[in-house]
Amino acid sequence: MADVGVRPARRADVAAIADIQVRAWRQGYRDIVPEPVLAEMTGPAALPVWRERWTEAATAPPSGRHGVLVAVANDLVVGFAAYAPAEDADQDPQAAAELVALLADPVHERAGHGSRLLAATVDLLREDGCATLLTWVFEEHEAMRRFFGSAGWAPDGARRSLAFPSGGSADMIRLHTDISAP
């Protein structure tokens, strides 16, 4: 049996986090995000930018309510989650948080890493007094919607459209769950 777990991200994890983000986006968004945009966001020039951003998020978060967790299997980073206070105008950032990212390496999908990351995030935010957890997903991303739905998340009616620099857009829906009680 593999030695698996979740822990706070460290500086040494940043390269793996950025690599997982790029691989997961290439696979998960290939039918949603236009190819030129996806290529720019996941290409060789983007990787150093993502590494810099994840280094800052993991080592110097803007507040104690921001965090990055990694899923590990046999000492290998196989997924990550990032969370922050909710910034949507209709949310109280003291009571609501946003799951900004939840990605597993496509090579390690369906091994429970996403579920472990989600549970650890909920536990940390609940301890911090958070009552609601939100996330935005592409409306067309059926796999992600099914994953969150199986964990008790549901759309809350909020929608937005993500405009792409090269033209076109993709609709997003906000999902939420009550984490106030175990």
Image (tube, helix red, strand yellow):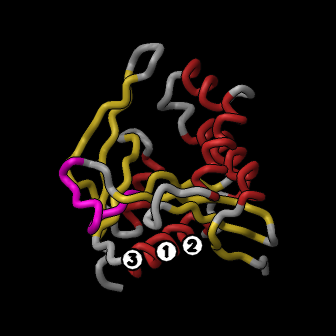
Q: Residue at 32% across / 56% down in the picture?
A: 86
Closer to the camera in the image, 164 or 144: 164
Alpha carbon distance from label 3 to label 1: 14 Å
Give the image location of residue 103, x and y in percent: 58, 53
Up the image or down, 110 lies above or below 29; here it is below
**Snapshot quadrant of residue 159:** top left
Is the residue marked by circle 1 packed among few (<14), some (14-19), or many (20+) residues within 10 Å? few
Label 3 vs label 2, nearer the camera? 3
The residue beneath circle 2 is 116
Which residue occupies 45% across, 52% down? 100
Helix, strand or loop at label 2? It is helix
The answer to which image quadrant residue 78 occupies is bottom right
Q: How many marks?
A: 3
Separation of marks 3 and 2 at Cα, in angstroms = 19 Å
- Find out whether the residues at labels 3 and 1 contact each other: C-beta distance under 8 Å: no
Secondary structure of the residue carrying numbered label 3: loop
Asked whether 114 or 84 is in front, the reply is: 84
Cα distance between the residues tagged 2 and 1: 5 Å
Q: Which residue is mark 1?
A: 119
Q: Determine whether 63 is above or below 180 in the image.
A: above
Looking at numbered disc 2 in the image, what kind of residue is underneath it? Arg
Residue 31: x %, y % from top left: 52, 31
> Pointer 3 and pointer 2: residues touching (CB < 8 Å)?
no
Q: Is residue 3 left or right of residue 49?
A: right
Is there a contact, CB below 8 Å, between mark 2 and mark 1?
yes
| Magenta run includes residue 93 | yes
Taking the image as drawn, is residue 147 in sight? no
Q: At numbered mark 1, what does the secondary structure look like: helix, strand or loop?
A: helix
Where the C terminus falls, by quadrant?
bottom left
Which circle's residue, 3 or 1, is located before the other in the chain? 1
